[in-house]
Image (cartoon, rainbow, N blue to C red):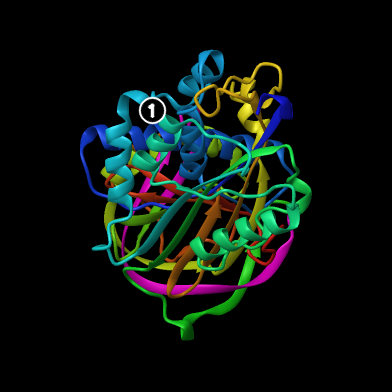
């Protein structure tokens, strides 16, 4: 095996969640999602892309799988970024994953993890065993010498696991005879609103984008009781927070600046998993006329740059990467890591998939109804029992799915 030369290792990612468990599980979920939210902030602040959708938990999952095979500085960088040692909390990670996919919940949530090694590449048995035990990862040998067939096999797997939402996850150009392993995490989420919107109430209304333009977009409307609150950043920037629950233990949280000329980054910088936990604990029920856009977003995100900026660098360097617990017989490194994600929000609820989300004031809020989301806003789909962030996004222009 050593004579084959240095292998490249290609990573692709994704996610899904759903749960109900102990404090340790909640802490693990939150720590993993915090890294994903940091990636979300990096992308939002450094990219011209307007509408963003990523899966924070999916990023953490794939890195957690890789961490099981890492050693020395490569491993220490992953531990520092993830803030947990998978070898130390593997039982909690396993419980969390099982909890996220419980069938008793009314929302549909599925997670699948796959290891696709080259047929000539031998994975270390402990690495395979741990990934099967913790992440229930499937192992499928692939002939990367035939890159078209290899890409087709992986893409069919990803499509199946994401309800057909993620197509063409990898291309034949991503793969070659030197590809040693492809690691895939796929997530599919379908949640029905606890209080659905009536389609007959949906009408085209104005949506004001940050650049001053106005677009006519389909706006859903309903009057109901929602948990609602006002939050303020350490820099005294005020913003509204709304919780839209699905029928299971998952909610969408929406953050909208109070002042229409406040840029989203001024609040986004201060949002982390603890911030969102505070939202859930302190929002208060009130009746609102809610008006919000239907929207679809789809995005492919290269994760190498944001992860490198967050201190995960060695695994991408062919000279410094250290993965002896994946394979002791051949040196490998991560050549690519990216995520494809898609979300659809309509009157019924939300469908989302990926193949890889301040201080709350408790006093009553003086806001006149209706509450209209007719300008850019942030959203976070959160599994409330664990604090895991399934998806995080920004809606800058609902009219453009890939703007």
Residue 248 figure quarter: bottom left
Q: Secondary structure at mark 1?
A: helix
Q: 255 or 160, which lies in front?
A: 160
Q: For the point 64% across and 23% down, which residue is it?
A: 331
Q: Residue furthest toward the left?
A: 22
- Residue range (magenta): 212-241
Task: From the viewer's perspective, tell me whether residue 183 is left or right of residue 332.
Answer: left
Q: 394 or 233, which lies in front?
A: 394
Q: For the point 27% across and 57% down, which residue is it?
A: 102
Q: Main secondary structure of the magenta part?
A: strand
Give the x, y percent position of residue 66: 51, 32
The answer to whether residue 213 is magenta is: yes
Q: For the point 41% across and 30% down, which residue is it?
A: 126
Circle 1 residue:
86
Task: From the viewer's perspective, tell me whether residue 257 is left or right of residue 142.
Answer: left
Give the x, y percent position of residue 38: 54, 33
Confirm whether residue 151 shows in the render. yes
Q: 242 or 306, which lies in front?
A: 306
Which quadrant: the C terminus?
A: bottom right
Q: 385 or 76, which lies in front?
A: 76
Give the x, y percent position of residue 234: 46, 27
Confirm whether residue 361 shows in the render. no
């Amino acid at each position: 095996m050593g004579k084959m030369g240095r292998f490249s290792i290609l990573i692709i990612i994704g996610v899904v969640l759903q749960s109900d468990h102990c404090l340790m599980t909640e802490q693990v979920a939150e720590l993993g999602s915090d890294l994903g939210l940091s990636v979300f902030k990096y992308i939002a602040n450094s990219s011209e892309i307007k509408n963003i959708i990523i899966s924070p938990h999916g990023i953490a999952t794939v890195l957690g799988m890789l961490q099981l095979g890492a050693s020395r500085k490569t491993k220490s960088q992953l531990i520092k970024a993830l803030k947990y040692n998978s070898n130390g909390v593997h039982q909690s990670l396993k419980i969390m994953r099982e909890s996220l996919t419980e069938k008793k919940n009314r929302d549909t949530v599925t997670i699948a993890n796959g290891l696709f090694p080259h047929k000539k590449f031998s994975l270390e048995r402990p690495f395979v065993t741990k990934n099967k035990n913790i992440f229930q990862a499937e192992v499928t040998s692939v002939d990367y010498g035939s890159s078209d067939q290899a890409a087709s096999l992986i893409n069919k797997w990803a499509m199946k696991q994401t309800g057909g939402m993620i197509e063409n996850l990898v291309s034949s150009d991503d793969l070659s005879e030197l590809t040693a392993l492809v690691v895939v995490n796929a997530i599919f989420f379908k949640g029905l609103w606890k209080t659905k919107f009536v389609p007959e109430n949906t009408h085209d209304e104005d949506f004001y984008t940050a650049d001053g333009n106005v677009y006519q977009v389909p706006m859903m409307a309903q009057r109901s009781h929602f948990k609602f609150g006002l939050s303020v950043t350490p820099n005294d920037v005020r913003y509204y927070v709304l919780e839209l629950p699905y029928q299971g233990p998952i909610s969408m949280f929406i953050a909208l600046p109070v002042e229409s000329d406040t840029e989203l980054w001024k609040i986004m910088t201060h949002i982390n998993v603890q911030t969102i936990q505070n939202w859930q604990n302190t929002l208060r029920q009130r009746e609102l006329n809610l008006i919000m856009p239907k929207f679809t977003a789809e995005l492919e995100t290269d994760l190498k740059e944001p992860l490198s900026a967050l201190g995960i660098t060695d695994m991408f360097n062919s000279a410094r990467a250290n993965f002896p617990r994946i394979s002791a017989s051949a040196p490998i490194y991560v050549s690519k890591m990216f995520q494809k994600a898609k979300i659809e929000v309509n009157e019924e609820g939300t469908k989302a998939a990926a193949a890889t989300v301040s201080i709350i004031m408790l006093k009553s809020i003086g806001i006149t109804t209706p509450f209209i989301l007719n300008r850019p806003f942030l959203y976070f789909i959160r599994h409330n029992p664990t604090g895991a962030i399934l998806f995080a996004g920004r809606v800058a222009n609902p009219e453009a799915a890939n703007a």
